[in-house]
Image: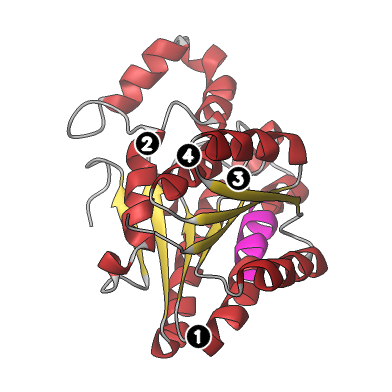
Amino acid sequence: MMLKDKVAVIYGAGGGIGSAVARAFAAEGADLFLTGRHLAPVEGVAKEVVSGGGSAETAEVDALDEQAVEKHLQLVIDNAGRVDISFNAVGIPNAKILGVPLIDLDVEHFSLPITTLVTSYFLTARLAARRMVPNRSGVIMTVTAAHSREGLPLVGGYGPAQAAKEALTRDLSVELAPQGIRVVGLRPYAMPETPTIKDAFEPRREASGMTWEQWQEMLASRTHPRRLMTLEEMANVAVFMASDKASGMTGTTVNLTMGRLSD
């Protein structure tokens, strides 16, 4: 097992990406501490993990609340002795951040994804790193999107937020790598199983005249294999990047756009 006995904390574990990563980490032997702003979906993921023979503890944690994150991490240390992996999959369930032209978008909704996504990543990464430094070992991870690298219409501050997260990954890595901590990101593209792609489709439905199926076909046509990535495929890469087999990878965001973007 690639993550046998690794202690992993996942923020946003009740969402599509967080839950997929949790299942994949558990299948490879990780001991999970799953968190989210709402406990019910997180507990659902934990039950699935445990029923499959894995280990998972749950907690209601707002990843924007520094004291809440600090308190939970101390609980992890008290129970498991260390933190090996910190994975930030925090999202924003707010459709108002998408679908509005930038010239019509108010500052509050433009800033929301930047302040939420970037700040939660910074807080969870910084506080996890403080626990990892004494052991000179650990992996800090997050997930971004193709918006970080290409201009897209009607996405408000979502693109700048993803670009900022990738910059933060590089900055954290250059400071933490000498202390044995790797910092890496994943950049998937338009996974239809996630709420994000559906949120992006809704404001375009009327303007484009496309159905949900046509929308997916259009996005898939932009990839090399002419299909969209699955959550399972993304989670499998997350497992590898969290494992010791990826020891040479840090300060980078893995391109999972299936050829949509070239590096």
Residue at image coords 47%, 39%? 20
Circle 4 residues within 10 Å: few <14, some 14–19, many ≥20: many
Distance from Cα at disc 2 to Cα at disc 3: 15 Å
Q: Position of residue 67 (x, y in %)?
A: 81, 69
Residue 171: image location, x then y, percent: 47, 78
- Identify the residue under disc 4: 20
Q: Main secondary structure of the magenta part?
A: helix
Q: Which residues are magenta?
A: 113-122
Specify which label sits upstream in the sequence, 4 or 1: 4
Where is residue 140? Give x, y as percent.
Answer: 49, 68
Q: Which residue is mark 1?
A: 135
Residue 13 image label:
3
The answer to whether residue 3 is above or below residue 58 is below
The answer to which quarter of the image holds residue 80 is: bottom right
Front tag of 1 and 2: 1
Q: Local crowd at mark 3 within 10 Å, few (<14), some, or many (≥20)? A: many
Give the amino acid at mark 3: Ala
User: CA separation, marks 1 and 2?
Assistant: 31 Å
Tell me if residue 48 comes above or below residue 141 in the rendering. above
> Type of residue at label 4?
Ala
